[in-house]
């Protein structure tokens, strides 16, 4: 390779990689404003404290990097999670749950550089505990502890990272992970390919727009590092630096590799050329022509695996959804085989990866006294980012999400009829109808009907003294504002007909 | 009241109250064994550490008082939670979520004596945080912070208490709470009565057996304490002692009131007589005859409220499900009005309360700088205990819960047909059929069919070379073990017909 070709490649690398950072400006600014307001409120409260105000005036906020979810947000989240769970169930997964905290030693030595972001609990006498950092390590602990040799499970739960929260980029200190993993001694790439199909099905069903699933293999990366002259004890550290290419430019990553990881410039430049390459299955044969690389067994093994994975992806009809991308490294230490990461490729989105995962064959063994391991492969959907994308989309389209499922509102047209409302409600609830009333004895009819329209409740029952005397109720269709009289005896039947 | 009558009442009290502790022996012993095994394992591991074994041999357990939930337990839990959510939605509730931890000052001063059980996070630079102790205080913080004046919401999430875990009694350090609350300035007892109806509907729908919902009123209790000569600054402390009557005998509680709360014996004996009384609506008129008690406005106000509550309970058809019980006190400080607690009254259950709640009108005000409050009433279902009851019941009946929803298993009758299985799976998944295969290339057909029977999968598709040549598949009904041949083109249609 001539010097000028290397230069050209590096220039191309530098030009290409930063282009992978794209953030949607309007969503950004909306979230940015919210973040700034929070900061200002915090400063204001701190000033208040310093000026000797009453200590009773406590700072009313959620902890840094966390947030409440109101009814609208929860309605959207539950819809998203339901769709994801449906995909996981379609693939035959069971579900499990583990405690939110683990004995600290369970988490130690599993996350490499990221370990500093683990939340520890205070030592209040007893065990030393930490909040879980992901769902994968607790899953491995669960398998080892229960001596479970095979399982296909999903786990949707919150995890905790003392990261510098960038709420504008959908990065929080408390966030949901949606994991699906297949554990067991199986044949190569069959479960791995299914994981890629699952990511594709999930993103399709969530309607987040066009995406690609970037693929790479840790063995191939190891081969590349070896071919570039990286000593093997620095493989994981270099991986963790390369993983930052989705947010940082190559020149920043290069600086980190040289200055922090202590690699020489010539090796680093060679790595830079490799990690700029991406494409389809043809990249496998291209790499096979690289005689320097092919000297390393891990590289040939990695390429063989990628070839089989492509074959299965083809059968499972997801080849058009994947990109073989040598810049994909994944930050975590525990991956041992195929790694993958899905990104949205629409014009106006730029939320980073929305799914990721890979094979981790040695993690369970770290918990076993005889180091007996269970091979595992799994994926994690980045639901927080997906929520952000969908929220922005719904806001743009002006779609209003209903936050309750109320079918019938029971209203009264005159004063002091609240007991009659409650009698009717009791009948409706007995019949399984979702129904509510105002908790005030006397409310104006107009206010009751307005509430129905605002909340999207389809039906209203109105009772007044006339209706009571005739043994009837007025049934109102809230949208069309049409009303009919119905004998009380036929009420449930009539409601069922209309729902 | 003559001395001997007092004596008689006290004897009756002592005889009656311990009878409220009833625990199912077989469940107890099963859980007790599990607990003892855990303790022994812990001791064994500690011994290992002391004997200088390799530090790599880490203690493989979940933190004290916590547990993993395997697929069977999760399947049962999700069924239970789904039923509860259906009831909450029937009553028009929205849902919200809050972070698992709060700034410590948010929790301070809300739980009385129980504050010592709060889990604190380690100070890692930044805010001082604690894990949430219940969902009520975070809810009040949420209302105050968002200046929300009315909401009807449910919240199902884990809470944390550094209690002495008694896993035999279904008491854990990490457990789910299922809360439903109505916040807003409404008319007396209308939302309160609905909360009682909701508890009743939930327990009914969960099929946990006979139950009663014990009712009392904090104002009435205050009146009783005043009439017994308790100084008002000791009301809450006495409440917290009386709350233990569901686990301890009156003589133990009496000892605590005298020795720890510093009340004199004569006042305590008077309290003992009151708290032994329970019954129905007639208890209201009986207490009205107690001229000493009627001198206290809080007692008359409490009784008025109870009368209105009974009226509404009657309309909502839950009068036969409630008991007016003066020994009900509830431990938490924040209740201000009606309080309630549901217990199972079957022969072979004794899990303590399975639901509780009450009115807390001043809690939100504790977070508002101008002490503006939002009246609230709510309930919490003790799902961990309900899970235990239902698990025991299912075990006794020998019912096996399915942990997946797989509809079709794709099997092969000869070797090296795994790619054909994958092709079929891709078609099934595209059609939305829940389907799986073995992740091994070659498995004996018998093993594949056995797996279907064990997992309760209703249908199996079998392909062999014959089927492939004919463009057919064999569709097997797993239960009846009958098989038919179907052209591949009709497969999805035929499967849909049979599911």
Image: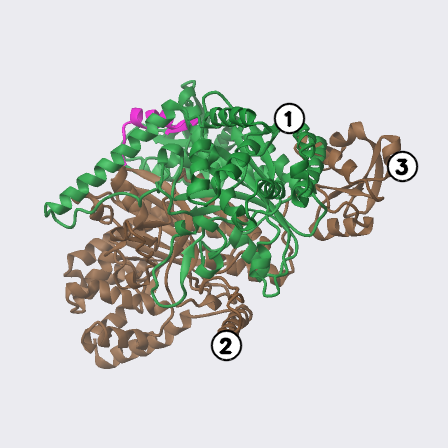
Chain colours: A green, B brown
Q: Are marks 1 and 2 on the same chain?
A: no
- Is residue B359 part of the magenta span, yes or no? no
Element type at marker 3?
helix
Determine the chain carrying the residue at label 3.
Answer: B
Where residue B294 sits: x, y (%)?
Answer: 17, 61
Q: Secondary structure at mark 2?
A: helix
- Res. A194 mark: none
Q: Is B476 situated left or right of B327 in this image?
A: right
Cβ atoms at labels 2 and 3 below 8 Å apart: no
- Chain of the residue under the numbered disc 2 shown in the image: B
Location of residue A220 in the rendering, given as x and y in whole percent from the top left corner: 62, 40
Reading the image, the residue beneath label 1 is: A320
The residue range painted magenta reads A441-462
Provide the residue designation for mark 2. Answer: B47
SS at mark 1 in the image: helix
Q: Are marks 2 and 3 on the same chain?
A: yes
Q: Which mark is in front, 2 or 3? A: 2
Q: Quadrant of residue A388?
A: top left
Relative to A325, A461 lies left or right: left
Which residue corresponds to the image point at 38% horizontal and 52% vertical from the top-left?
A: A119
Q: Is residue B393 visible?
A: no
> Which label was assigned to residue B466?
3
Q: Is residue A170 visible?
A: yes
Callout 2 crowding tier (Cα within 10 Å): few <14, some 14–19, many ≥20 = few
Q: Position of residue A67 (x, y in %)?
A: 35, 40
Q: Are marks 1 and 3 in contact (CB under 8 Å)?
A: no
Say which of B473 and A110 sits in front: A110
Disc 1 from disc 3: Cα separation: 32 Å
Task: Identify which residue, A333 or A284, lies in the foreground.
Answer: A284
The number of discs equals 3
């Amino acid at each position: 390779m001539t010097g000028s070709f290397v230069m050209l490649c590096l220039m191309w690398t530098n030009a290409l990689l930063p282009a992978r950072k794209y953030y949607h400006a309007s969503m950004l600014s909306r979230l940015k404003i919210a973040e700034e307001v929070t900061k200002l409120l915090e400063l204001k409260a701190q000033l208040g404290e310093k000026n000797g105000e009453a200590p009773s005036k406590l700072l009313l906020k959620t902890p840094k990097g966390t947030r409440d979810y109101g009814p609208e947000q929860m309605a959207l989240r539950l819809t998203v999670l339901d769709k994801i769970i449906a995909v996981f169930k379609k693939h035959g997964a069971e579900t499990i749950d583990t405690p939110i905290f683990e004995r600290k030693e369970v988490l130690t030595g599993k996350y490499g550089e990221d370990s500093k972001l683990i939340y520890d609990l205070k030592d209040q006498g007893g065990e030393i505990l930490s909040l879980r950092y992901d769902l994968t390590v607790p899953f491995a602990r669960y398998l080892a502890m229960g001596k479970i040799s095979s399982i296909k499970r999903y786990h949707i739960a919150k995890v905790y990272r003392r990261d510098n929260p960038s709420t504008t980029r959908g990065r929080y200190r408390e966030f949901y992970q949606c994991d699906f993993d297949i554990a067991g001694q199986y044949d190569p790439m069959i479960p791995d390919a299914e994981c890629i199909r699952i990511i594709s099905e999930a993103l399709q069903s969530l309607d987040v727009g066009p995406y690609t699933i970037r693929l790479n293999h840790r063995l191939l990366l190891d081969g590349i590092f070896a071919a570039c002259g990286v000593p093997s004890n620095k493989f994981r550290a270099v991986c963790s630096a390369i993983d930052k290419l989705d947010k940082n430019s190559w020149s920043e990553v290069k600086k980190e590799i040289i200055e922090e990881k202590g690699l020489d410039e010539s090796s680093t430049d060679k790595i830079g050329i490799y990690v700029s390459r991406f494409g389809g299955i043809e990249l496998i044969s291209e790499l096979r022509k690289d005689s320097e690389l092919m000297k390393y067994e891990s590289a040939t093994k990695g390429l063989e695996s990628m070839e089989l994975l492509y074959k299965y992806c083809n059968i499972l009809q997801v080849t058009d959804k994947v990109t073989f991308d040598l810049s994909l490294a994944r930050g975590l230490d525990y991956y041992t085989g195929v790694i993958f990461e899905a990104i949205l490729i629409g014009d106006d989105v730029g939320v980073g990866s929305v799914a990721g995962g890979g094979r981790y064959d040695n993690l369970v063994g770290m918990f076993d006294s005889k180091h007996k391991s269970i091979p595992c492969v799994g994926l994690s959907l980045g639901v927080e980012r997906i929520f952000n994308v969908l929220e922005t989309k719904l806001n743009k389209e002006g779609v209003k999400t209903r936050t309750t499922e109320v079918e019938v509102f029971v209203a009264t047209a005159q004063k002091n009829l609240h007991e009659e409302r409650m009698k009717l409600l009791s009948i409706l609830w007995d019949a399984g109808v979702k129904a509510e009333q105002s908790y005030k004895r006397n409310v104006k009819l107009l206010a009751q009907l307005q509430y129905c329209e605002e909340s999207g409740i389809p039906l209203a029952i109105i009772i007044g003294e006339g209706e009571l005397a005739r043994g009837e109720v007025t049934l109102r269709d809230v949208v069309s504002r049409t009303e009919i009289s119905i004998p009380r005896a036929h009420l449930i039947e009539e409601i069922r007909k209309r729902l």
